[in-house]
Image (cartoon, rainbow, N blue to C red):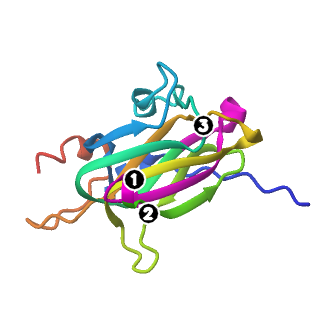
């Protein structure tokens, strides 16, 4: 039996933001978890520090709920996982569900990961139209961990929306650090 190859890491999401095509919108959402150990919750999941993490503390599936106040267009999720540091706490099977609320969530992606080490990019494009999805809620469910681990670690989760063209005028995209510092002035 062939051993599955390791899940290759994606690019750092900060590089994607610098292209000017996507914007991180996780701060616009209300985040909740199915469970967590004290000191290992949403704050650690969203603190931009790859050394901290959310650690679940309950039975599977472990859930991360991301709720927006209004219907929001979402293009991609980025999850940072590190098998070398987390071993049996590393997710191996993830389900991504979207909907208006907890009662009508539908799975749109299921992802199997083999010893991931780095950013995992999960596209949230509609498979029929190839357009970003529009939703009130995203739920990430950890269905299984490596080595049949019980609890899970996730180090970071980022949520991205596409950047729309300005209706005022067509400006070139700001891609350098110097230009990005002043882009809101325009």
Residue of label 3: 59
Label 3 element class: loop
Q: Could you tell me how far apart the alpha carbons at marks 3 and 1 are, in whole angstroms? A: 20 Å
Residue of label 1: 138
Residue of label 2: 124
Who comes first in sequence, dot 3 or dot 2? 3
Q: Are marks 2 and 1 in contact (CB under 8 Å)?
A: yes
- What percent of the width, then of the height, locates residue 140? 48, 49
Residue extending farthest right: 1
Who comes first in sequence, dot 2 or dot 1? 2
Label 1 element class: strand
Question: Dot 1, crowdedness within 10 Å: few (<14), some or many (≥20)?
Answer: many
- Which residue appears at 33% of the width and 54% of the height? 101
- Which residue appears at 52% of the width and 23% of the height? 37
Give the number of the mark in front: 3 or 2. Answer: 3
In the rendered view, tell whether residue 160 sits above or below residue 106: above
* Span of residues in magenta: 80-103
- What percent of the width, then of the height, locates residue 112? 66, 56
Task: Please tell me whether residue 30 belongs to the stretch shown in magenta.
Answer: no
Give the number of the mark in front: 3 or 1. Answer: 3
- What percent of the width, then of the height, locates residue 137? 34, 53
Label 2 element class: loop
Q: Could you tell me how far apart the alpha carbons at marks 2 and 1 are, in whole angstroms? A: 10 Å
- For residue 160, the mark is none
Question: Dot 2, crowdedness within 10 Å: few (<14), some or many (≥20)?
Answer: many
Confirm whether residue 14 shows in the render: no
């Amino acid at each position: 039996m062939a051993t599955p190859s390791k899940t290759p890491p994606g690019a750092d999401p900060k590089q994607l933001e610098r292209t000017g095509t996507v914007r991180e919108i996780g701060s616009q959402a209300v985040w909740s978890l199915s469970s967590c150990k004290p000191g290992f919750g949403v704050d650690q999941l969203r603190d931009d520090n790859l050394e901290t993490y959310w650690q679940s503390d309950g039975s599977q599936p472990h859930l991360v709920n991301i709720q927006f106040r209004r219907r929001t267009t979402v293009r991609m999720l980025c999850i940072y996982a590190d098998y070398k540091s987390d071993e049996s706490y590393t997710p191996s099977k993830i389900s991504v569900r979207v909907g208006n609320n907890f009662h009508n969530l539908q799975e749109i992606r299921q992802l199997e990961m083999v010893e991931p080490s780095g950013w995992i990019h999960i596209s949230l494009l509609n498979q029929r139209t190839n357009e970003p999805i529009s939703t009130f809620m995203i739920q990430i469910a950890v269905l299984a961990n490596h080595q049949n681990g019980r609890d899970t670690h996730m180090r970071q989760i980022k949520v991205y929306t596409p950047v729309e063209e300005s209706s005022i005028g067509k400006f070139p995209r700001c891609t350098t650090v110097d230009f990005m510092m002043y882009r809101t002035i325009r």
